[in-house]
Image (cartoon, grey):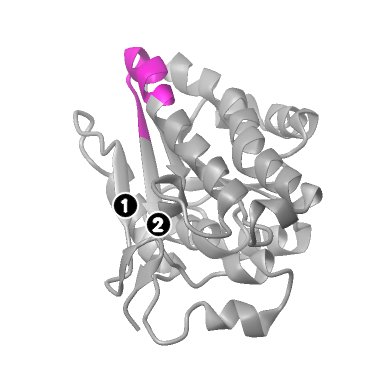
Amino acid sequence: MDQFAFVTGATSGFGEATARLLAQNGFSLILMARRLERLEKLKNDLSSEKCKVFVLQTDIRNENEVIEAVNSLPDEVKSNIRILVNNAGLAVGRGPIESGISDDWERMIDTNIKGLLYVTKAIVPFLIANKSGHIVNIASIAGKEVYPGGNVYCATKHAVDALSRSMRIDLVQYGIKVTNIAPGAAETEFSIVRFKGNSETANSVYDGYEPLVAQDIAETILFIVSRPAHVTINDLTIMPTAQASASVLWK
């Protein structure tokens, strides 16, 4: 039977690159994201005799949607989920706490923390039943440090970091691995979303140095999930060479 990897935020950035690389390396896929057209395109690109692809158009901020989407999968698919990549997340806005926008805060909290929890809770029972599996949580260098204007985003990624450590403790008795990945500056749609479509500001974030790209994180995930059964990489920080900390970049 196929081994399935469940990837959230699968239609762009780290999620899409990870889906493509896992498909090339023998996994079938369950892809969850909001944008149906992109999901269907990715399914068409990756589906083959060796790679079955299921797509779930879902807003992970809505727990009922998550539950219904997971429940819609065939039983033989759910029972063969081996990897969960909690990739969906975003930053919205950047500025001092006193000028923060409540809607931005709620989007980050609902997606980065609550959405991750909803999806994990829906998938973990299948991993427990198999006494194996691997959860990969995409956190951030913002979950290790804080920086000016990052306040709520940093708080959400610190939460992901803490959840990764606590999940590892909770799930070790079932043979389930949990890995926290903390990327530094990476050129994806991240800054476009953060700066609400202002491409000039978004592109300036990457001026003067070579940032990470989505493929770097996908290759890291593949390495992590392909370790022998007795090996778990609990926590990994990956940065562009030009970046020494969250706020120190050599340009």
Q: Are marks 2 and 1 in contact (CB under 8 Å)?
A: yes
Query: What span is colored magenta in the figure?
Result: 166-178
Q: Position of residue 28 (x, y in %)?
A: 49, 46
Query: Which residue is most to the top?
Result: 173
Q: Amino acid at mark 2?
A: Pro
Q: Quadrant of residue 241?
A: bottom left
Residue shown at 44% from the left, 31% from the top: 162
- For disc 2, the neighbor class at 10 Å (few under 14, some 14 to 19, many from 20) is many
Give the secondary structure at mark 2. Answer: strand
Residue at image position (48%, 63%) is 17
Relative height, residue 172 to residue 145 (above, below): above
Q: Secondary structure beneath disc 1?
A: strand
Residue 216 picture quarter: bottom left
Instruction: Locate residue 152 relative to residue 131 in the image: left or right.
Output: right
Is residue 49 part of the magenta span, yes or no? no
- Please tell me which residue lies in front, 51 or 133: 133
Q: Which mark is residue 237?
A: 1
